[in-house]
Image (cartoon, rainbow, N blue to C red):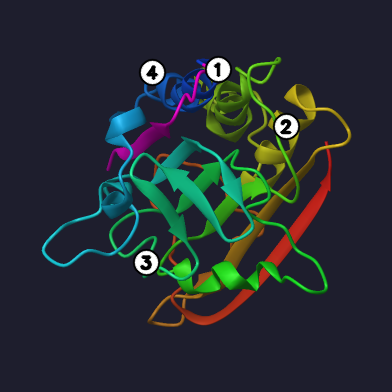
Protein backbone atom coordinates (compact mmCIF):
# COMPACT_ATOMS: atom_id res chain seq x y z
CA UNK A 1 0.00 0.00 0.00
CA UNK A 2 1.31 3.45 -0.92
CA UNK A 3 2.08 5.77 2.00
CA UNK A 4 0.53 9.18 1.41
CA UNK A 5 2.29 12.38 2.49
CA UNK A 6 1.05 15.95 2.61
CA UNK A 7 2.25 19.52 3.04
CA UNK A 8 0.46 22.52 4.54
CA UNK A 9 2.10 25.94 4.68
CA UNK A 10 1.43 29.61 5.35
CA UNK A 11 4.23 31.79 3.97
CA UNK A 12 3.38 35.03 5.80
CA UNK A 13 5.95 36.80 3.64
CA UNK A 14 8.63 34.11 3.94
CA UNK A 15 8.74 31.65 1.05
CA UNK A 16 11.04 29.44 3.08
CA UNK A 17 8.01 28.23 5.02
CA UNK A 18 6.57 26.78 1.81
CA UNK A 19 9.94 25.27 0.93
CA UNK A 20 10.20 23.59 4.34
CA UNK A 21 6.86 21.84 4.02
CA UNK A 22 7.09 20.95 0.35
CA UNK A 23 10.69 19.80 0.71
CA UNK A 24 9.55 16.92 2.91
CA UNK A 25 6.79 15.73 0.62
CA UNK A 26 8.53 16.39 -2.69
CA UNK A 27 11.51 14.24 -1.74
CA UNK A 28 9.45 11.38 -0.35
CA UNK A 29 7.20 11.57 -3.41
CA UNK A 30 10.11 10.50 -5.61
CA UNK A 31 10.32 7.14 -3.83
CA UNK A 32 8.41 4.05 -4.85
CA UNK A 33 5.86 3.36 -2.14
CA UNK A 34 5.24 7.02 -1.28
CA UNK A 35 2.88 9.53 -2.89
CA UNK A 36 2.66 13.30 -2.39
CA UNK A 37 -1.11 13.59 -2.47
CA UNK A 38 -1.96 16.76 -0.50
CA UNK A 39 -0.44 20.24 -0.84
CA UNK A 40 -2.20 23.28 0.62
CA UNK A 41 -0.85 26.79 0.99
CA UNK A 42 -1.94 30.14 2.44
CA UNK A 43 -5.72 30.49 1.87
CA UNK A 44 -5.92 26.73 1.33
CA UNK A 45 -4.89 26.09 4.96
CA UNK A 46 -8.29 26.02 6.64
CA UNK A 47 -9.49 25.12 10.12
CA UNK A 48 -11.88 22.35 9.11
CA UNK A 49 -9.06 20.30 7.61
CA UNK A 50 -7.70 19.87 11.16
CA UNK A 51 -10.73 20.22 13.42
CA UNK A 52 -13.55 17.68 13.37
CA UNK A 53 -16.44 19.18 11.39
CA UNK A 54 -19.83 17.47 10.86
CA UNK A 55 -20.38 16.31 7.29
CA UNK A 56 -16.77 16.94 6.30
CA UNK A 57 -13.66 14.76 6.11
CA UNK A 58 -10.56 16.51 7.36
CA UNK A 59 -7.93 16.43 4.60
CA UNK A 60 -5.15 16.09 7.16
CA UNK A 61 -6.29 12.51 7.66
CA UNK A 62 -5.96 11.61 3.99
CA UNK A 63 -2.22 11.20 4.54
CA UNK A 64 0.08 9.09 6.70
CA UNK A 65 2.59 11.88 7.39
CA UNK A 66 2.36 15.66 7.17
CA UNK A 67 4.81 18.53 7.29
CA UNK A 68 3.25 21.86 8.23
CA UNK A 69 4.67 25.38 8.35
CA UNK A 70 2.72 27.88 10.42
CA UNK A 71 2.88 30.14 13.44
CA UNK A 72 2.19 28.58 16.81
CA UNK A 73 2.01 28.83 20.57
CA UNK A 74 1.74 26.22 23.33
CA UNK A 75 -2.00 25.86 22.83
CA UNK A 76 -2.45 26.06 19.09
CA UNK A 77 -1.26 26.85 15.59
CA UNK A 78 -2.41 29.30 12.96
CA UNK A 79 -4.49 28.54 9.88
CA UNK A 80 -5.60 31.02 7.22
CA UNK A 81 -9.05 31.55 8.71
CA UNK A 82 -8.12 31.48 12.39
CA UNK A 83 -6.39 28.92 14.55
CA UNK A 84 -6.52 25.32 15.71
CA UNK A 85 -6.22 24.93 19.47
CA UNK A 86 -6.31 22.36 22.25
CA UNK A 87 -9.87 23.46 23.01
CA UNK A 88 -11.04 22.27 19.57
CA UNK A 89 -12.22 18.76 18.76
CA UNK A 90 -9.16 17.28 17.08
CA UNK A 91 -8.87 13.57 16.25
CA UNK A 92 -5.61 13.18 14.37
CA UNK A 93 -5.39 9.66 13.02
CA UNK A 94 -9.08 8.85 12.93
CA UNK A 95 -8.50 8.29 9.23
CA UNK A 96 -4.86 7.69 8.35
CA UNK A 97 -2.54 10.24 9.96
CA UNK A 98 0.37 8.82 11.95
CA UNK A 99 3.03 11.58 11.91
CA UNK A 100 2.28 15.29 12.33
CA UNK A 101 5.40 17.45 12.07
CA UNK A 102 5.43 21.23 12.25
CA UNK A 103 7.81 24.10 12.95
CA UNK A 104 5.07 26.05 14.75
CA UNK A 105 6.77 27.76 17.69
CA UNK A 106 6.33 26.37 21.21
CA UNK A 107 3.57 23.95 20.19
CA UNK A 108 5.13 21.20 22.30
CA UNK A 109 6.31 23.35 25.18
CA UNK A 110 6.51 21.22 28.31
CA UNK A 111 7.00 22.83 31.71
CA UNK A 112 5.99 22.23 35.30
CA UNK A 113 3.08 24.63 34.85
CA UNK A 114 2.08 23.76 31.26
CA UNK A 115 2.30 20.07 30.44
CA UNK A 116 2.50 18.96 26.82
CA UNK A 117 -0.21 16.52 27.83
CA UNK A 118 -2.68 19.21 26.77
CA UNK A 119 -2.25 17.75 23.23
CA UNK A 120 -3.06 14.15 24.19
CA UNK A 121 -6.78 14.52 23.31
CA UNK A 122 -5.72 15.24 19.71
CA UNK A 123 -4.34 11.69 19.40
CA UNK A 124 -6.87 9.29 17.90
CA UNK A 125 -4.58 6.83 16.11
CA UNK A 126 -1.78 9.40 15.74
CA UNK A 127 1.69 8.10 16.61
CA UNK A 128 3.86 11.24 16.71
CA UNK A 129 3.62 15.00 17.01
CA UNK A 130 7.00 16.52 16.12
CA UNK A 131 7.59 20.18 16.87
CA UNK A 132 9.40 22.53 19.23
CA UNK A 133 9.61 23.25 22.94
CA UNK A 134 10.44 26.91 22.28
CA UNK A 135 10.69 29.25 19.28
CA UNK A 136 11.91 28.01 15.90
CA UNK A 137 12.86 30.07 12.87
CA UNK A 138 12.26 30.33 9.12
CA UNK A 139 13.93 31.97 6.16
CA UNK A 140 17.39 32.13 7.68
CA UNK A 141 18.81 28.78 6.63
CA UNK A 142 15.88 26.57 7.63
CA UNK A 143 14.48 26.05 4.11
CA UNK A 144 15.82 22.49 3.96
CA UNK A 145 14.28 21.36 7.28
CA UNK A 146 11.66 19.19 5.59
CA UNK A 147 14.15 17.73 3.14
CA UNK A 148 16.52 16.71 5.92
CA UNK A 149 13.65 15.16 7.86
CA UNK A 150 12.69 13.10 4.80
CA UNK A 151 16.34 12.22 4.08
CA UNK A 152 16.98 10.70 7.50
CA UNK A 153 13.48 9.29 8.04
CA UNK A 154 13.28 7.35 4.78
CA UNK A 155 14.86 8.73 1.60
CA UNK A 156 18.50 7.65 1.95
CA UNK A 157 17.48 4.24 3.25
CA UNK A 158 15.35 3.47 0.22
CA UNK A 159 17.39 5.23 -2.47
CA UNK A 160 20.51 3.30 -1.42
CA UNK A 161 18.64 -0.03 -1.41
CA UNK A 162 18.83 -0.24 2.39
CA UNK A 163 22.59 0.45 2.52
CA UNK A 164 22.23 3.75 4.40
CA UNK A 165 20.82 3.30 7.92
CA UNK A 166 17.24 4.40 8.45
CA UNK A 167 16.68 6.61 11.48
CA UNK A 168 13.69 6.46 13.77
CA UNK A 169 11.09 9.19 13.40
CA UNK A 170 12.24 10.87 16.60
CA UNK A 171 15.93 10.74 15.63
CA UNK A 172 15.29 11.97 12.09
CA UNK A 173 13.37 14.97 13.44
CA UNK A 174 16.16 15.76 15.88
CA UNK A 175 18.92 15.44 13.25
CA UNK A 176 17.07 17.63 10.74
CA UNK A 177 16.70 20.44 13.24
CA UNK A 178 20.24 20.19 14.61
CA UNK A 179 21.37 20.92 11.04
CA UNK A 180 19.15 23.95 10.38
CA UNK A 181 18.63 25.58 13.79
CA UNK A 182 20.89 27.16 16.39
CA UNK A 183 21.60 25.60 19.77
CA UNK A 184 19.16 28.01 21.42
CA UNK A 185 16.26 26.20 19.70
CA UNK A 186 14.82 23.03 21.23
CA UNK A 187 13.30 20.26 19.12
CA UNK A 188 10.51 18.25 20.76
CA UNK A 189 8.14 15.39 20.22
CA UNK A 190 5.10 13.81 21.84
CA UNK A 191 4.42 10.18 21.00
CA UNK A 192 1.82 7.58 21.84
CA UNK A 193 2.66 3.93 22.42
CA UNK A 194 0.46 0.96 23.30
CA UNK A 195 -1.18 -2.00 21.62
CA UNK A 196 -3.68 -2.65 18.85
CA UNK A 197 -7.27 -3.62 19.62
CA UNK A 198 -6.19 -7.28 19.50
CA UNK A 199 -3.30 -6.79 21.92
CA UNK A 200 -0.47 -6.71 19.37
CA UNK A 201 2.39 -4.40 20.36
CA UNK A 202 2.31 -0.92 18.83
CA UNK A 203 5.48 0.50 20.31
CA UNK A 204 6.55 3.76 18.68
CA UNK A 205 9.91 4.37 20.35
CA UNK A 206 11.84 2.84 17.45
CA UNK A 207 9.23 3.55 14.78
CA UNK A 208 10.52 4.29 11.29
CA UNK A 209 8.81 5.80 8.26
CA UNK A 210 8.49 2.69 6.12
CA UNK A 211 6.52 2.00 2.96
CA UNK A 212 4.43 -0.51 4.92
CA UNK A 213 1.79 0.42 7.46
CA UNK A 214 2.70 0.17 11.14
CA UNK A 215 0.51 -0.93 14.04
CA UNK A 216 -1.64 1.81 15.56
CA UNK A 217 -1.49 2.32 19.36
CA UNK A 218 -5.20 2.42 20.13
CA UNK A 219 -5.31 0.51 23.44
CA UNK A 220 -3.30 0.41 26.68
CA UNK A 221 -1.85 3.73 25.67
CA UNK A 222 0.83 5.80 27.31
CA UNK A 223 2.37 9.07 26.17
CA UNK A 224 6.00 10.12 26.15
CA UNK A 225 7.72 13.38 25.40
CA UNK A 226 11.27 14.63 24.97
CA UNK A 227 12.97 17.86 23.99
CA UNK A 228 16.56 18.98 23.60
CA UNK A 229 18.90 21.55 22.18
CA UNK A 230 19.47 21.71 18.44
Furthest residue toward left: 55
Q: Indicate which disc, 2 or 3, sits on the residue closer to the N terminus.
A: 3
Asked which secondary structure carries label 4, the reply is loop
Q: Return the mark for residue 30.
A: 4
Q: Mark 3 points at which residue?
A: 91
Discs 1, 2 touching: Cβ within 8 Å: no
Give the residue displayed 62% in from the left and 25% down from the top. Answer: 145
Q: Residue 226 vs residue 57: left or right?
A: right
In front: label 1 or label 3 = 1
- Asked if residue 91 lies in the magenta stretch, the reply is no
Q: Return the mark for residue 177.
A: 2
Discs 4, 1 touching: Cβ within 8 Å: no
Q: Can residue 41 be seen in this view?
A: no
| Mark-to-mark CA distance, 4 and 3 | 29 Å
Q: How crowded is mark 2: few (under 14 residues within 10 Å), some or many (20 or more)?
A: many
Q: In this view, does 20 lie above or below 195?
A: above
| Mark-to-mark CA distance, 1 and 2 | 15 Å
Give the residue displayed 65% in from the left and 45% down from the top. Answer: 168
Along the line of sight, the residue nearer the viewer: 91 or 154: 91
Amino acid sequence: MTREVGSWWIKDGIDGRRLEAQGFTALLGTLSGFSWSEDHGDSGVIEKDFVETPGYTEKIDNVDAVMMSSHGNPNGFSVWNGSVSTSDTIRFGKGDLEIFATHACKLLEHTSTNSVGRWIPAFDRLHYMCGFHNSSYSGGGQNARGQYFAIYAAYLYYVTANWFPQYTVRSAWKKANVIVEGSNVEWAYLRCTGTTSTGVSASTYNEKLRTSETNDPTHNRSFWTAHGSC
